Amino acid sequence: LVSSLRDVKRKLDDHCSNGSSNEGLSSSELRNLKGIELTVLQNKVIRNVTLDLDVVDGLGTDRLVHWAGAQLQDSYRSVRERGYVPECNGVYISRWHHGSPAHRYGLYALHWILEVNGTPTPDLETFLNETSALADESFVRLKVCHLDNRLKVITLRLDHRFWPTWELTLDHASGQWFRKVDSSQASLEQLQQ
């Protein structure tokens, strides 16, 4: 019976250590945990509940991609805590820039990009692989999902001259951000910046 937060912590520690005295499960093993069954006392009623588990690194965002004027990243903690992330994860749009293709064609923040030209994009790496070969001024079809679970499909025309793909990555050792421009899309002046 769980009646306090201390009981929940004890139950989680037992669940994650599998009864051994080591430090518990590795992060990859924790990702595969489904949930933990708890018996709780709530409003003088004993109930059985399932507590879903999630691994959170606590570091926040460490990679941003700017594509067609939209800022893309993995779903960060506060978005996941709202309770809805698409089943296939997708690539989260955290903001867009005025005048960009994203702005002109309706690719706004608080959406996930689920597919590019019919190919699922569960993460940034897959998204970049699917979009890196797209030519300047070509059209791309995107399936997106809003934060409130509404799906829509939009077509966007790329403009690599003014809105090339570039990426910011955080070096955890030094705490510095590094910018990399996709050399297949950028002009010589943009690469020299």
Image (spheres, grey):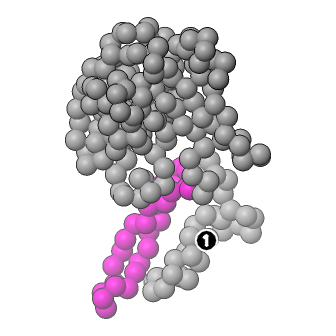
Give the residue at x 61% y 71%.
14
Residue 158 sits in which quadrant? top left
114 to 176, vertically: above or below: above
Q: Is residue 182 magenta?
A: no
For label 1, the SS is helix
Of residue 87 and residue 30, the one placed in the foreground of this image is 87
Give the residue at x 22% y 41%.
150
Q: Is residue 44 magenta?
A: yes
Of residue 191 and residue 41, the one placed in the foreground of this image is 191
Residue 115 can be seen in this image:
no
Of residue 157 and residue 57, the one placed in the foreground of this image is 157
127 to 84, vertically: above or below: above
How far from the left and from the top, in percent, is residue 188? 61, 11
17 to 72, vertically: above or below: below
Screen quadrant of the C terminus? top right
Of residue 14 and residue 55, the one placed in the foreground of this image is 55
Residue identifier under label 1: 14
How far from the left and from the top, in percent, is residue 171? 71, 41
The magenta segment:
31-56
Give the residue at x 75% y 64%.
22
Main SS of the magenta part reads strand
Q: Report the amino acid beneath label 1.
A: Asp
* Residue 20 as seen in the image, left or right of residue 57: right
How far from the left and from the top, in percent, is residue 67? 45, 26
Outermost bottom residue: 44
Screen quadrant of the N terminus? bottom left
Residue 68 can be seen in this image:
yes
